[in-house]
Image (cartoon, rainbow, N blue to C red):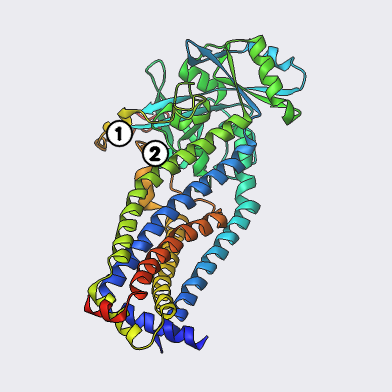
């Protein structure tokens, strides 16, 4: 097979793969609209949720929409998280994995 | 048509002669496209998800601000707000944060009353009694517990309190419930030792969505220390958050883009002696300037199109099938509990077309233009260097 035909075939295959992925994505979007979205909306409405549970490290990241005025992402346009501290301080190292398990004794038993 | 195919054959043969160089450009180009489009796909999907899900958020959330900080709101405010015309319902929301020293994670505790049934994303049920709780999948994972197990927390009075897990939210709801612990309202009030006449904030439902801003103004007039947050503000905050997140990541990856541009520019402007000789020979053999430019155009197209298709395909697989593991390292921040991205693959095709235009066209231009300069020179002087 000549180089040109090989390139056309390879590009056609890559394009077909891309179109297939886009079709699968659109199928997942349809599925989400039918099944997931109503269920998630029900959750938001029932529990009166206002924010995503994505970043739980600080109040203003756990509930960006409910944070103090001077916190990032609020009304003041330049108050986005540009604090120099964020670029100097790293997260704490992981804590030792200590586990304490406490179980209720059935009533009437003695330890 | 046949002429174009023959020139394309020649272009491929020419690229194969410089296999290492061509391949390295394809790899770097594809990586740049994959990195940029991963950020765009992820943030667009999150933004769409926020817009759609937060459509169910309360019309208004009323907080009380004391000394510039969020404070508990007196229950009397509920009665005052209910009297405002246009207000359908006011529901007190009771919630707070809990730092779990065992896992180093922060949980969000939320009180419910009346234990509404039929939540499809909850395996089990919501708590109905003072010793029961429902938890998000992140809490279940961090504490290695499931339904019927006990969840022990330290209360405001420094006492260990046990709650029986009666429900676990499904992994499909993790974006909303990952760190949530739902308790019965009275139990939460006791746990946090909330004063009985106070609540965290008030969720207000308004009959006509167009009157939300007016109701907010009236609330502010009645209670100057109140801070009404409208539904529109909640959605706009998320738009800003993901634009910013996207901007930060894009600025990180822009370094890769700049490096690629330097590589492409160097390759394109600094024609090697071999390439110059090739152009000279072609011209001496009777190729005109247009043919040489067409050859370079096809060479650029082969590289740019292959790299773009590879990059976009990799980005789609990375974000929507693998859960964006490479981006999570950056996006995760300091969170101990971080949900796995199981995003609905909302794709903005316009973004993809813009990305294609912004990467393929500059590469083609930087390939063809310098060759044009060599191609218009006398073949003899080009071959002699």
Q: Label 1 belongs to which residue? A: A87
Visible in this render: residue B167? Answer: no
Mark 2 to mark 1 CA distance (whole Å): 21 Å
The location of residue B325, given as percent across then percent down, is 37, 52
Residue density around tag 2, few if under 14, some if 14–19, many if 20 or more, within 10 Å: many
State whether discs 2 and 1 lie on one chain.
no
Is residue B282 or residue A40 the one in the foreground?
B282
The quadrant where residue B101 appears: top left
> What residue sits 38% from the left and 47% below the top?
B328
Is residue B253 or residue B199 the one in the foreground?
B253
Depicted B362 relative to depicted B124: above or below: below
Is residue B142 or residue B54 the one in the foreground?
B54
The answer to whether mark 2 and mark 1 are in CB contact below 8 A is no
Residue B264 placement, left or right of A46: left
Q: Secondary structure at mark 1?
A: helix
Residue density around tag 1, few if under 14, some if 14–19, many if 20 or more, within 10 Å: few
Q: Label 2 belongs to which residue? A: B337
Depicted B189 relative to depicted B122: above or below: above
The location of residue A110, given as percent across then percent down, is 34, 28
Depicted B229 relative to depicted A32: above or below: above
> What residue sits 57% from the left and 31% below the top?
B234
The location of residue B124, given as percent across then percent down, is 55, 42
């Amino acid at each position: 097979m000549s180089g040109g035909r090989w390139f056309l075939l390879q590009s056609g295959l890559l394009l077909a793969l891309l179109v297939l992925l886009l079709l699968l994505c659109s199928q997942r979007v349809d599925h989400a609209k039918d099944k997931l979205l109503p269920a998630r909306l029900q959750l938001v409405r029932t529990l009166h949720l206002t924010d995503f549970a994505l970043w739980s490290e600080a109040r203003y990241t756990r509930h960006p929409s409910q944070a103090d005025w001077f916190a990032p992402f609020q009304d003041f346009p330049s108050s986005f998280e540009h604090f120099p501290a964020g670029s100097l301080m790293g997260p704490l190292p992981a804590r030792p994995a200590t586990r304490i398990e406490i179980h209720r004794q059935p009533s009437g038993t003695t330890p | 048509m046949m002429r174009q195919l023959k020139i394309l054959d020649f272009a491929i043969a020419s690229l194969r002669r410089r296999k290492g160089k061509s391949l390295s450009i394809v790899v770097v180009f594809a990586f740049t496209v994959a990195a940029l489009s991963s950020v765009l796909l992820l943030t667009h999907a999150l933004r769409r998800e926020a817009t759609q899900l937060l459509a169910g958020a309360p019309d208004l959330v009323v907080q009380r601000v004391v000394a510039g900080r969020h404070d508990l709101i007196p229950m009397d405010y509920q009665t005052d707000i209910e009297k405002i015309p246009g207000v359908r319902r006011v529901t007190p929301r009771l919630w707070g944060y809990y730092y779990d020293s065992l896992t180093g994670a922060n949980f969000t505790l939320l009180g419910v009353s009346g234990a509404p049934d039929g939540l499809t994303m909850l395996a089990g049920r919501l708590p109905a009694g003072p010793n029961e709780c429902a938890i998000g999948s992140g809490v279940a994972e961090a504490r290695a517990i499931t339904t019927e197990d006990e969840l022990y927390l330290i209360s405001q009075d420094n006492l260990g309190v046990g709650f029986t897990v009666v429900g676990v939210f499904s992994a499909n709801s993790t974006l909303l419930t990952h760190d949530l612990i739902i308790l019965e309202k009275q139990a939460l009030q006791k746990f946090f030792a909330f004063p009985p006449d106070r609540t965290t904030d008030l969720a207000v439902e308004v009959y006509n969505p167009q009157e939300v801003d007016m109701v907010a103004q009236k609330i502010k007039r009645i209670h100057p220390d109140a801070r009404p947050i409208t539904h529109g503000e909640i959605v706009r905050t998320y738009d800003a958050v993901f634009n910013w997140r996207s901007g930060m990541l894009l600025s990180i990856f822009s370094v890769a883009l700049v490096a690629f541009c330097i590589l492409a520019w160097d390759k394109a402007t600094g024609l090697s002696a071999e390439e110059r000789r090739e152009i000279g020979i072609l011209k001496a053999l009777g190729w005109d300037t247009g043919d040489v430019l067409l050859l370079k155009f096809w060479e650029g197209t082969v590289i740019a199109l292959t790299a773009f298709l590879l990059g976009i395909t990799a980005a789609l697989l990375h974000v929507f099938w693998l859960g964006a593991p490479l981006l999570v390292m950056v996006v995760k921040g300091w969170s101990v509990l971080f949900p796995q991205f199981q995003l609905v693959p909302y794709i903005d095709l316009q973004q993809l077309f813009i990305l294609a235009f912004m990467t393929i066209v500059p590469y083609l231009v930087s390939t063809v233009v310098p060759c044009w300069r060599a191609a218009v020179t006398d073949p003899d002087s080009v071959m002699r260097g």
